[in-house]
Amino acid sequence: MNILDWATSLQAYLVVGTCLFLLGVFAVLSRRNTIGILLGIELILNAAGINFVAFSKFRAAAIDGQVFTLFVILIAAAEAAVALAVILRFYRLKETINADEANILRN
Amino acid sequence: MENFLPVLLLLFFAVCLCIGIYTVSHILGPKNPNASKLSTYECGVEPEGSARVPFKTHFYLVAVLFLLFDVEGVFFIPWAIIYRDSLKEGTDILIAGGLYMALLVLALSYIFRKRLLRLH
Amino acid sequence: MTPEMMTNLKLFAPEIALTFFLCTLFVYDAVLPSLRKTLFPLIVIVFGMGLAIWATADVATGVQTYFSGMIANDGFGNFFRIFFFATAAICAIVAYGSKELETSGRTEFGLLLLCITFGLSLMANATHLLTLYIGIETASILSFAMAGFARHTLRGNEASIKYLIFGALSSGLMIYGFSLIYGYTGSLQYAEIGKYLTAHADGRPLIVLFALFLIYGGIAYKISAFPMHFWTPDVYEGTTSPVATFFSVGPKAAGVAALIRFFLTACATKTGEGVWTSIPGLSLPNAVAMIAAVTMLIGNLSAIGQTNVKRILAYSSIAHVGYILMGLVGMEKTGLTAILFYLVAYCLMNIGAFWVVGIVSDIKKSEDLSAFRGMGWSSPTLGVCMAVFLFSLTGIPMFSGFIGKFLLFGALLKAPGFLWLAIFGVLNSVVSLYYYSKILKAMYFERDEQVVALDLLPLHRAGLVLLAIPTVVLGLFFGPVIEFAEKAVLSFL
């Protein structure tokens, strides 16, 4: 069962983390929908969380990584709360959540 | 690894069952759409107006406050797990937990005082 | 209570005092809303910051880490604590003199300010990646809210969105870098990371450089260094002036402190009293020199064509970060002392400059260069103070900005092989003279068609003079501050 052995090794978790990270970065950089951008940011934070937990299980003796992941989830929640409030105010003012419409301040 | 094999089998069977039932009904079922069959279902009443109604943004506030206090509650769980054993080394754990709870109670009392959770 | 907990709480006393006054504001806002329109929140903030500064002086004994090695208590950290508390108090005064902040929202502004200061203090004193992350995120998330404080205007909201998206992306990248460093070294403490990186200096995978670059990216976003500086002009232009005042001083100093602490503890080894050498394979001086050069260049060149004074000041703050990073190149105590002195001088002159812009935009409703026409004649105090701040920002001799730049160049020349950077810095200062003198030209050599009576509050007059005087005095009597900064650097953990 070679594939299943690989699937519970450190590498598999890191691959999942990297995929999530790349998808998240792609989502942030390419989407015009501000809530889509927020989703990308959440993907990036969760990728880091997966990395932390995986490393904590396979590399370090302590549970530092898992504690860090808890804090990452907490701060991601707070960030999403503030971000959604700002986006909601943006929608109130402009009737759209297209990020391209935020274009008054430019060079 | 062997423990996970039944789970994988279950997953496979569930997916196959869903796809199978859907495909069979799609192939064998009659196709006679008409207007009243395709309209939206509204518990027997005729639907009127658009389905998208602007909702009060106050709901956002309630949802976000729930989210924040929920995540805060998550941090109580590790504290509660080590509480009894840490009490043997002194009242540190009680003070730490008490300060954490005091800050959150302060935030909660601010919310209650400003009546932010009232929906009417 | 165990003695360890007593030590923890005793050393954390300044932040506890800050939290106490924060809770006082919170409680008074909820219980007695009628006090919002008075000066009460301002008094609470200023008194609280004064108490916090006194508490910092009280705990400034011994170099140690507390909270099980997560926060450091050394002279370097205490310097920055006093810096942040003083900056918060001054920015609170600036905010209360400004008409742009609605009267009813002032308590929330004070709350946000105090909380961000708490985050900044954590950032500057962190010796563990978790504390650094909590500090950065506290400061960032609340800054998103503070940037959008003028929430009914499109500009304020747009500033907040741009800041938010950029900031969340940067901190996500930084956290991914943290996870990779944690995986490679097995620990989150700066000291342990440093030990592991030194011990395994050969055969280091490329991923470690990538992770360090991501971590640098996260901190560079806070100090608006290259490559994460793109948000600065838009956000500074869109927010209200008091908010821009605080942003240009507080998070920058905290980011610089966090950068110094992380990269000197985790990516360099201390080889002597106030001297560091980088770990083989991670050439810190070259990287910092490159970044400083590019940041200076971008800041100064982009400021040339601007007509909005807040954008000019925003680009100039980017350039100043470039100068500040020059002090880190040598990785020894003269450079760090120069950075600390420059931060103090920069705080005074930048707060002053932004305050003047805020006053002018309150009266004339515009932040363009044309709003400054004839200011020097219609309001002598404003004109002279702005001239002092601008001269100091350029680096004209006998102002504190000149002494700061002189110290930075001096420290740079001590490190062999960076003469090109020093010459580059001098050229950039000359370029900056051009756009600062554009403002001075508008103030003194152009006349306004309609003369608007300028009524400055006594608060404005007193405050500006109180900021301008140290700017000049520090240029002449810089000894005490330099000695204080050097003592702070020598007691770096």
Image: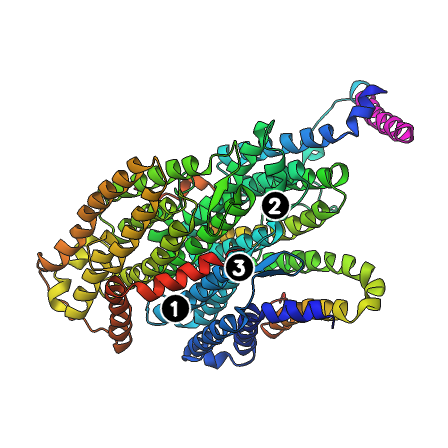
Screen quadrant of the N terminus of chain C: bottom right
C441 or C164, which is in the foreground?
C441
Q: Nearer the viewer, mark 3 or mark 2?
A: 3
The subunit letter for the residue under badge 2 reads: B
Residue B32 numbered mark, or none: none
Residue B51 numbered mark, or none: 2
Q: Position of residue C97 (x, y in %)?
A: 33, 71
Q: Considering only vertical position in the picture, is B57 above or below C194?
A: below
Screen quadrant of the C terminus of chain C: bottom right
Q: Quadrant of residue C401?
A: bottom left
Callout 2: helix, strand or loop?
loop
Circle 3 Cα neighbour tier, 10 Å, few/some/many (<14 / 14–19 / ≥20): many
Q: Nearer the viewer, mark 1 or mark 2?
A: 1
Q: Position of residue C309 (x, y in %)?
A: 25, 53
Callout count: 3
Work out whether disc 3 and disc 2 sit on a shared chain. Answer: no
C275 or C148, which is in the foreground?
C275
Residue C102 numbered mark, or none: 1
Inspect the image, locate mark 3, and give the three-letter code of the amino acid beneath it: Gly
Inspect the image, locate mark 2, and give the three-letter code of the amino acid beneath it: Ala
Relative to C474, C248 lies left or right: right
Q: Main secondary structure of the magenta part?
A: helix
The subunit letter for the residue under badge 3 reads: C
Q: Which residues are magenta?
A: B1-25
Cα gap from disc 3 to disc 2, whole angstroms: 45 Å
Q: Position of residue C371 (x, y in %)?
A: 19, 58
The subunit letter for the residue under badge 1 reads: C
**Residue position marked by numbered label 3 in the rendering:** C119
